[in-house]
Amino acid sequence: MKKIIIDCDPGVDDAIALLLALASPELEILGIVTVAGNVSLSFTEKNARKICELANRGDMKVYAGCPRPILRSLETARHVHGETGLQGVDLPEPQMPLQRQHGVEFLIETLLQASEPITLATLGPLTNLAIALIQAPQIIPKIQEVVLMGGATGQGNVTASAEFNFYVDPHAAHIVFTSGLPLTLMGLDVTHKVLTTPERLQQIRAIASPVSTTAAAMLAHYGAYDVEKYGMLGSPLHDPCVIAYLIQPELFLGRNLHVAIETTSELTMGRSVVDLWQAGQQAPNVHVIQQADDEGFYSLLIQRLSEL
Ligand code: BDR
Ligand code: CA
């Protein structure tokens, strides 16, 4: 079992990622930390608890981390995920408690006490991890790897240049990308190839369990936005790619490249500058995923959702 901590901002695709992780015996989830991103922190922490309870995992520990990016004001993606972050469903108020400890403190304490390095799966803006790295750089050797959803080599989904997670907190992303940590990046180049087509949505719905019915309802709403905006066949499942990589890395293919994050130009704020040809002659600092077996991904997801 791989020991992981998930840092997320649910969000519909974060919610599907949490369900995939909770259904996967390969992963031992030590805790779920939330951050402001798709919606405000009060929604993301509550949504994480709602999803745990939907999966009958009220025993999970959910922590609230940072309520805003390091320097910039919070910009949300309510237009994509809905006012609550989980539009399309009305899940009951969670009964499980929010942990009292701050998410950043939990990260630091858990890493420092760990006997073996821990993998971090980050699905939202990188504020919590960046603050943890500043507060306690001694956590670095305790981190096996960070698998992140964010960025792209040549496109943006919130501006022409930038992907949402890096745009929201580019300074946090910069801190993480210059930390020397082993990083694996799941960007839009690959997540835009992992689409919930109407057929796949129907397969999820056809499981006909409370979990799959809820997942399908959320995805139907979330998909409508992407189909209209990008003319895609369905919604990209960005964040679940991170979890699928931790379970079945053979579904993905990538290259080691140098990546830097833009933090000064308003025009390209938050852009992940990926040096595809080593033009800048800087040593690679990121394993950039470029291809995914989307059929394999959906059969994994559908199989795991049917087990919840
Ligand atoms: C990322 O932004 C968020 O809206 C999604 O949850 C995902 O993490 C995609 O750009
Ligand atoms: Ca997310």
Image (cartoon, rainbow, N blue to C red):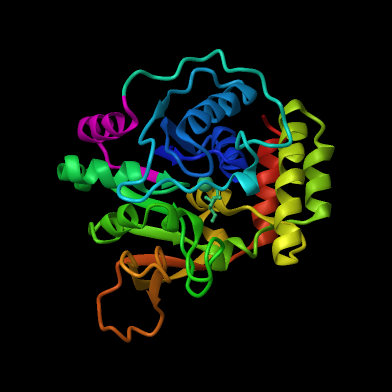
Work out which residue is located at the far top of the displayed protein and give it: 95
Q: Which quadrant would residue 278 be assigned to in this image?
A: bottom left
Q: Quadrant of the N terminus?
A: top left
Expressed as whole percent of the image width and height from the top left, the position of residue 224 reads 76, 52
Q: Relative to 107, is 16 on the left or the right?
A: right
- Tell how many labels: 0
Q: Is residue 3 visible?
A: no
Question: Magenta span has 115?
Answer: yes
State which quarter of the image contains the C terminus: top right
Q: Residue at x 82, y 32 (%)?
A: 208
**Residue 68, image x and y in percent?**
38, 41
Residue 78: % across, % down: 60, 44
Query: In the rendered image of this protein, does residue 129 appear above or below residue 277?
Result: above
Position of residue 187 in the picture relative to residue 292 (left or right): left
As rendered, which of 135 and 142 lies closer to the eye? 135
In the rendered image, residue 281 lying in the magenta stretch gets the answer no
72 on left or right of 246: left
Q: Is residue 234 left or right of residue 84?
A: right
User: Which residue is drawn at the image coordinates 64% and 54% (left, top)?
Assistant: 297
Q: Quadrant of residue 53?
A: top right
Compared to 98, does 223 lie above or below? Answer: below
Relative to residue 15, is residue 76 depicted above or below?
A: below
User: Which of 98/112 is in front?
Assistant: 98
Per the rendered image, the range of residues in magenta is: 102-120
Q: Residue at image x 37%, y 48%?
A: 126
- Tell me if residue 74 can be seen: yes
